[in-house]
């Protein structure tokens, strides 16, 4: 059999890309901002601007981090769910696992940024974190993948984009008028204030109705995973990933002329443009790693990528950049993976997490 047709159950480039994304979350912004403060050239200033979010309109490279996280989550869905379906796992069992993961991700989001551990309802935010966006996108993408034919997944993707674009431009916002894509004047933000009440995070980011965008971003990853999982030669897979990325980025930029690209409210044009960049990045990593076989440099990214949720939580428990404790991140991620995947050690997970939080609170690391 042609080696290029053999597709392993776990794609190294996906793990490495996820690890690359995690390291961007942990280090990139503070590194380039610090570099600019130290050097102060026009070049370092432009780099620093690329690792900071724009005030509202437009996008920078830093804006790709969150959509890339959702995209990669979607890319592994065809591999994980197809395996369970082939094993004749009942839908009830799959749904139970999905609901469990949804709840775990939401709770972790509350701990990381929802101020759950403050034990003060006045500080609690019910929906305000990347992990919770992943929970929404992952759950609904999996439900669609399990129950619908592949052609209907494309329909759901398009429907999410169109429906959310209409929500942002058609309804009236009480006391403001017709919804427009501006701070405090869009319906998605009004709806968050209405639904979450005192538990809203008070920022310009939107969450509840933006679940349509989170689902669309995750589904774009599902399509990439399906392409990688196909029987196409790897060279063609890499080429098609790149072409789809260019087309999606172009469509997003064109749509952005009338429907502006705004990361904070995850506009549909932002979904298309950011998904295009995600496809291009995946094409690059897939070409280097899975087509050309250049893998010697991948180990640290692979470790982080295979334990991305643990790494994300740990990165918010510890200030790695300030305290230069990068080895803790790898060690913690490996330990968490052991405790999570080996049933013999799962009972130690709560103890590990409580210990980490205690260490952070006492500032003894």
Image (cartoon, rainbow, N blue to C red):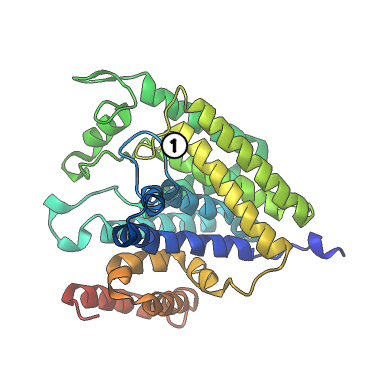
Q: Residue at x 75, y 56 (%)?
A: 234
- Is there any visible trace of residue 63 in the rendered image? yes
The x, y position of residue 163, in whole percent, is 46, 27
The x, y position of residue 52, in whole percent, is 35, 49
Q: Residue at x 51, y 60 (%)?
A: 18
**Residue 117 versus residue 272 in the image, above or below:** below
Q: Quadrant of the C terminus?
A: bottom left
Q: Quadrant of the N terminus?
A: bottom right
Q: Nearer the viewer, residue 114 or 255?
A: 255
Q: Residue at x 59, y 47 (%)?
A: 279
Q: Nearer the viewer, residue 346 or 15?
A: 15
Q: Nearer the viewer, residue 106 or 323?
A: 323
To which quarter of the image does residue 112 belong?
bottom left
Q: How many marks?
A: 1
Q: Residue at x 26, y 25 (%)?
A: 185
The x, y position of residue 17, in whole percent, is 55, 60
- Is there any visible trace of residue 87 in the rendered image? no
User: Can you identify the residue that label 1 sits on?
Assistant: 212
Q: State left or right for residue 8 relative to residue 251.
A: right
The x, y position of residue 299, in whole percent, is 56, 74
Q: State left or right for residue 54 relative to residue 212.
A: left
Q: Residue furthest right?
A: 1
Q: State left or right for residue 280 relative to residue 131.
A: right
**Element assignment for label 1:** helix
Query: Callout 1: 10 Å neighbours few (<14), some, many (20+)?
Result: many
């Amino acid at each position: 059999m042609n080696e290029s047709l053999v597709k392993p159950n776990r794609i190294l480039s996906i793990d490495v890309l996820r690890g690359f994304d995690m390291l961007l979350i942990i280090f990139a912004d503070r590194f380039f901002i610090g570099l600019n403060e130290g050097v102060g050239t026009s070049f370092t200033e432009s780099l620093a601007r690329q690792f900071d979010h724009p005030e509202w309109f437009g996008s920078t490279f830093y804006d790709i981090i969150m959509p890339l996280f959702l995209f990669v989550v979607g890319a592994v869905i065809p591999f994980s769910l197809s395996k369970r379906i082939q094993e004749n796992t009942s839908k009830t069992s799959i749904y139970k696992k999905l609901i469990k993961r949804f709840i775990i991700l939401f709770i972790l989001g509350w701990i990381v940024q929802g101020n759950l551990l403050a034990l003060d309802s006045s500080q609690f935010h019910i929906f305000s974190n990347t992990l919770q966006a992943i929970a929404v996108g992952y759950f609904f993408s999996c439900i669609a993948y399990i129950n619908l034919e592949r052609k209907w997944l494309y329909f759901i993707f398009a429907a999410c984009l169109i429906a959310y674009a209409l929500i942002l431009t058609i309804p009236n916002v009480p006391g403001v008028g017709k919804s427009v894509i501006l701070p405090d004047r869009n319906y998605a933000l009004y709806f968050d204030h209405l639904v979450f009440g005192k538990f809203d995070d008070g920022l310009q980011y939107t969450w509840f109705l933006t679940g349509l965008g989170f689902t669309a971003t995750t589904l774009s990853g599902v399509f990439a995973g399906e392409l990688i999982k196909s029987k196409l030669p790897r060279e063609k897979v890499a080429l098609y990933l790149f072409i789809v990325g260019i087309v999606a980025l172009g469509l997003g930029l064109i749509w952005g002329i009338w429907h502006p690209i705004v990361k904070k409210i995850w506009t549909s044009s932002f979904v298309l443009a950011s998904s295009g960049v995600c496809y291009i990045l995946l094409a690059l990593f897939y070409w280097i790693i899975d087509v050309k076989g250049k893998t010697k440099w991948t180990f640290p990214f692979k470790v982080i990528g295979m334990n991305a949720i643990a790494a994300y939580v740990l990165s918010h428990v510890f200030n790695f950049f300030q305290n230069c404790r990068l080895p803790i991140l790898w060690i913690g991620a490996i330990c968490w993976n052991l405790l999570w995947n080996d049933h013999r050690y799962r009972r130690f997970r709560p103890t590990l997490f409580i210990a980490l939080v205690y260490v952070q609170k006492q500032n003894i690391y």
